[in-house]
Image (tube, rainbow, N blue to C red):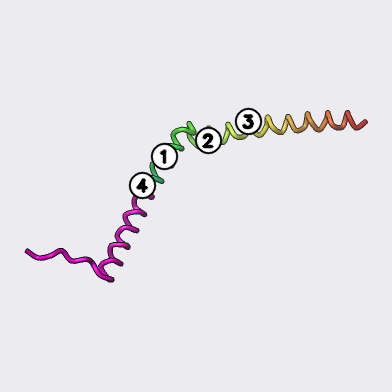
Amino acid sequence: MLPLQVPGGPELILIALNLLVLLAVLLGILGGIGFFLLRMRSGGDVEERLDRIERKIGGLEARVEDLNERVSELEE
């Protein structure tokens, strides 16, 4: 029976590179899954999301105008 050999320098470098590649693949897969989950949770297609954001911006602009009018009334 032969004794087990401990890997030396070149073998350790190859093992480290292999682990780095596997880690990169795992992170890519998890990132892709996360991206698609966030995409599904956001709801709707791009046009619907843009319309929703534009409505929110319009509401915020109206609030800013209202606050500016109140401030100008208080300054008078």
Give the residue number, with chain letter if any, for mark 3: 55
Rendered position, 35 above or below 10? above
Give the residue number, with chain letter if any, for mark 4: 29
The amino acid type, in three-letter code, at marker 2 is Glu
> Between marks 4 and 1, how big is the CA–CA gap?
11 Å
- Return the x and y of residue 31 as percentages of the image width and height: 41, 46
> Is residue 64 a member of the stretch shown in magenta?
no
Q: How crowded is mark 3: few (under 14 residues within 10 Å), some or many (20 or more)?
A: few
The amino acid type, in three-letter code, at marker 1 is Phe
Q: What element carries label 4?
A: helix
Q: How crowded is mark 4: few (under 14 residues within 10 Å), some or many (20 or more)?
A: few
Q: What element carries label 2?
A: helix
**Residues at circles 3 and 1 in contact by the CB criterion of under 8 Å:** no
Give the residue number, with chain letter if any, for mark 1: 36
Camera-side mark, 2 or 4 = 4
**Residues at circles 4 and 3 in contact by the CB criterion of under 8 Å:** no
Q: How many labels does the image show?
A: 4
Q: Which label is found at residue 47?
A: 2
Dominant secondary-structure state across the stretch colored magenta: helix
Give the residues in magenta: 1-27
The amino acid type, in three-letter code, at marker 3 is Arg
The amino acid type, in three-letter code, at marker 4 is Ile
> Between marks 2 and 4, how big is the CA–CA gap?
27 Å
Between 73 and 15, which is closer to the camera in this rendering?
15
